[in-house]
Amino acid sequence: MKVLFLTGGSPATVFALAPLASAARLAGHDVLLASPEDMAPVATSVGLPVVAVTDGTMRRFMLSDRDGRPLSIPDDPRERLDFNGRGFGRLAAATLPELRTLVADWVPDLVVGGSLCYAAPFLAHELGVPWVRHTWDLGEPPEMDLGAAAELRPELDSLGLDGLPAADLWVDICPPGLRGSGAGPRQGMRFVPYNQRRPLESWVLRRPERPRVCVTAGSRVSDAQETAGLRELAAALGALGADVVIAAPEAVAASLRDADRGVRAGWFALDTLLATCDLIVHHGGGQTSLTALHAGVPQLFVPTIPKMVPPCSRVSDFGAALTLTAPRQTPADIAGAAAVLLSDPSYRERARSVSEEIARQPPPAEVVGVLEELVGAFRAR
């Protein structure tokens, strides 16, 4: 069986697909990833073969129209969802020419696309093969599909399609107890953390006497304002008596260490680091959230993008986290919420219950069998 996986434009979209793609390879199937050029090194870092299908970045697709004219991010949260969906639609349109060239020589039996990889249904429709929609995290708002469909109207019209083709199957890595509403048949799969690795220091594996708090703004943090915000936040949490560790790209981490020799910062594989943490404070990224839930660690969400608020709120409503939305995101607000999470054991108990639910889901190797059956059923038609 030949399986083509389509990623998005951030490392998290690669890491989300890596467990199933790796399991399919280990089962003897021929696997290939297609991604934007800047994500190809991320794919190869986790041992997966990859072909770059666009030199455009996700930032460009979000902030420019197809003719290169700049776009402004809307202030209204509902309009922002449509805006984001259209950006992913432009990513799909940009990748389709190279994808069609690729499958002319390497014809897949199955296409697996990440949550917002809208090229996947087009490609599968043209090839007459099934396509699987693979969630990246806790779920994406359905309004983004509407924005993508509007952006891709020319491509839909050219194929005589009224709307985006429905997936033949969803592979869902969100724990069942935290899932939002969603259409289509669902195959649950155990979330398996994937990260780019670095050599470990022994302290990472040793639980300190005082509470350890991980702070991260994700893999894309870069500018001076974001770096200063991490430094200010670390100081506020350190005042609680916590052992603060900042997980950040090495360039940012080096800047933090240069400014304050007492700051412990670096590129840490979160699944390893969180095994000795009591709390993680972060922006609400889906892979970060799932990695913390996998570790049974309470979370303090400080989301800055509207689409992240609903999944963060579901975890908070379950009792495994707290969510601070603007304008309640000052260092003092965050330190106060962190103090609550560290002192109330119920948050860890609820987080651990989700970890146990994750462990009960079918492993990727078992889901490969489901994909084999899906392809077999298509061939038998």
Image: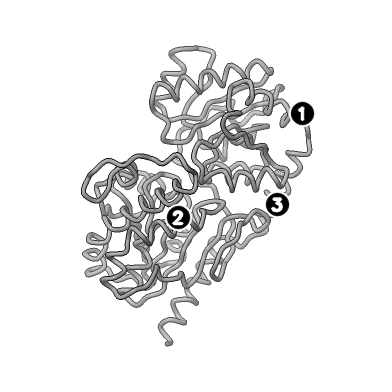
Seen from the viewer's position, the closer of residues 131 and 26 is 131
Quarter location, residue 96 = bottom left
Sequence order check, earlier mark of 3 and 1: 1
Name the residue rendered at 34%, 73% in the picture: 161
Circle 3 crowding by C-alpha within 10 Å: few under 14, some 14–19, many from 20: some
- Per the image, label 1 sits on a secondary structure element best described as helix
Seen from the viewer's position, the closer of residues 344 and 337 is 337
Circle 2 crowding by C-alpha within 10 Å: few under 14, some 14–19, many from 20: many
Sequence order check, earlier mark of 2 and 1: 2
Q: CA distance from mark 3 to mark 1?
A: 22 Å
Name the residue rendered at 24%, 47% in the picture: 55
Q: Quickly name the residue at label 1.
A: 343
Q: Quickly name the residue at label 3.
A: 356
Give the side of residue 332 with respect to residue 306, left or right: right
Quarter location, residue 236 = top right
Give the side of residue 78 with respect to residue 45, left or right: right
Give how far across and how far down residue 238 sits, in percent. Answer: 63, 17
- Per the image, label 3 sits on a secondary structure element best described as helix
Q: Quadrant of the C terminus?
A: bottom left
Give how far across and how far down residue 277 sits, in percent. Answer: 64, 32
Name the residue rendered at 74%, 39% in the picture: 347
Q: Quickly name the residue at label 2.
A: 144
- Whether 91 is drawn above or below 225: the answer is below
The amino acid marked with disc number 2 is Met
Q: CA distance from mark 2 to mark 1?
A: 38 Å
- Per the image, label 2 sits on a secondary structure element best described as helix
The amino acid marked with disc number 3 is Glu
